[in-house]
Amino acid sequence: MYEGFTIVFVEDDLAVRSSVTETLELAGFEVAPFESAEDALGQLGSSFAGVVISDVRLPGMDGFELLRRVCAFDTTIPVIMVTGHGDVSMAVEAMRCGAYDFIEKPFAMERLVEVVSRAMEKRALRLEVDTLRRQLQDRRGIEATLLGNSPAIRELRRQILNLADTPADVLVFGETGTGKEVVARCLHEHSKRSKANFVAINCGGLPENLFESEIFGHEAGAFTGASKRRVGKIEHAHGGTLLLDEIESMPMALQVKLLRALQERKIERLGSNQGVPVDFRIVAATKSDLKELSVQQKFRSDLYYRLNVAVLELPPLRERREDIPILFEHFSLQAALRYGREAPALAAHDMLRLMAGDWPGNVRELRNAADRFVLGLPGMHLDAADAAAAPTTLAQQMEMVEKTLVEQALKQHGGRPQAICDALGIGKKTLYDKLHRHGIVIDDFRPAPGGERGMGAL
């Protein structure tokens, strides 16, 4: 039932010890019976995989002292106390001291098996969290920050490391929730600038009348309320990195001043005519097409071309679905540690459901889903109808994965067969066989009349 897990059972009565041991073994548990608490202690430690069952009254060290010893090195090991009728008050005291549960003699074996099963599940979940925590701590370098093994994320990590130590300013493009700030921090932390400040500012979150002062700083008396000199974000980022998130929201008038600061590496505080040399790197992040905005004269074209030298494009989560399991595991572990909860196991059909989702909010939305899952809130579990229809066999699960990948390719390439075949590495006959088998209508993925038509349609 729980492979590698053991029940340490302490009972000085041979007949009881033998009977209970046999019952637990028939229930599928591995049992290590002991006559004394002293002998049992030698089998226990902080990494002990299992639970302890102990009678309260024992020769030598009693069950109460055994509980104290176990709690001294690991309070998370479940200890179940077995008590006689006259020992109930002692058992209640044991519960206060950390016992998982107590069972009063005489007891039904079914009751014991039930309590042990719950205790074993609790211990298994605790050890799983500890293992995941160690795995998280063992991750090193950029792989610990940008998780995933998909080709897209591996290429992104390669590009970041390639650009990190260059002086080039970087434009990071990606949908909402894809991790643009995480990428900016990776560029900073893996560069020679890592010992200086990483300064982030959201261009869409500042009132326009405060923007110039926030970015460039001001001198005392520069405007009403400016009682003393204030260092701006660019100057604070001297020697380090400045992230301008949602740069498309920056007012046009300030875009001119930013361009000048980028070209001259010098700024002027509000209320001052003296230039201040600054050594900083700009990482600009956007979810918008800056080139299109520049055509529409909503973003300065000269600033766009100044930034459009080193560009990192972040893949949306739907284009790297194979990374969803490791990301969800990571976020679940973080949530478990943050909320003081155990990290529950996710059923296989639920994971397939996660991998099949569109995730418009990308990694941020997946992290929120993991939080809800750990907290036991709605939004993660299948309802009864879905659960009944969920794939169970390996073949059924593979069919679901295949259907998801085909639909993803159809969406990406607007229903154009040749482009889809090239992306999936299959022939057209194979594609149409799969469409027929999965009941997918290719026309549902083609642009509406009047829009761009698929060039590869047969």
Image (tube, rainbow, N blue to C red):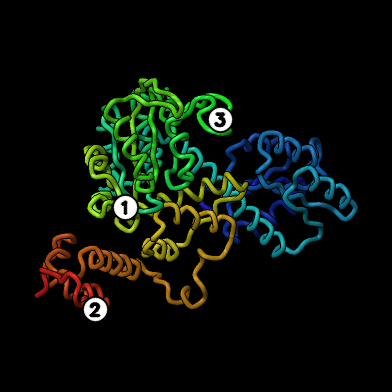
Q: Which residue is mark 3?
A: 226
Q: Give the percent coordinates (x, y) of residue 183.
A: 36, 40
Q: CA distance from mark 2 to mark 3?
A: 64 Å
Type of amino acid under label 1: Ser
Q: Give whichever of 137, 176 is nearer the camera.
A: 176
Type of amino acid under label 3: Ala
Query: What numbered label is drawn on residue 138?
Result: none
Q: Quadrant of the N terminus?
A: bottom right
Check contact, mark 1 vs mark 2: CB within 8 A: no
In the image, is residue 34 above or below residue 82?
A: above
Query: What numbered label is drawn on residue 441?
Result: 2
Q: Secondary structure at mark 1?
A: loop
Q: Is residue 368 left or right of residue 245?
A: right
Q: Quadrant of the C terminus?
A: bottom left
Q: Residue at x 46, y 74 (%)?
A: 386
Label 1 or label 2, whichever comes before in sequence order: 1
Disc 2: CA contacts within 10 A as few (<14), some (14-19) or many (>=20) = some
Q: Residue at x 41, y 29 (%)?
A: 234
Q: Give the percent coordinates (x, y) of residue 105.
A: 81, 57
Q: How many marks?
A: 3
Type of amino acid under label 2: Val
Q: Give the percent coordinates (x, y) of residue 272.
A: 43, 24
Q: Residue at x 47, y 34 (%)?
A: 213
Q: Which residue is mark 1?
A: 288
In the image, is residue 376 above or below residue 145?
A: below
- Using the rendered view, name the quadrant where residue 283 is placed: top left
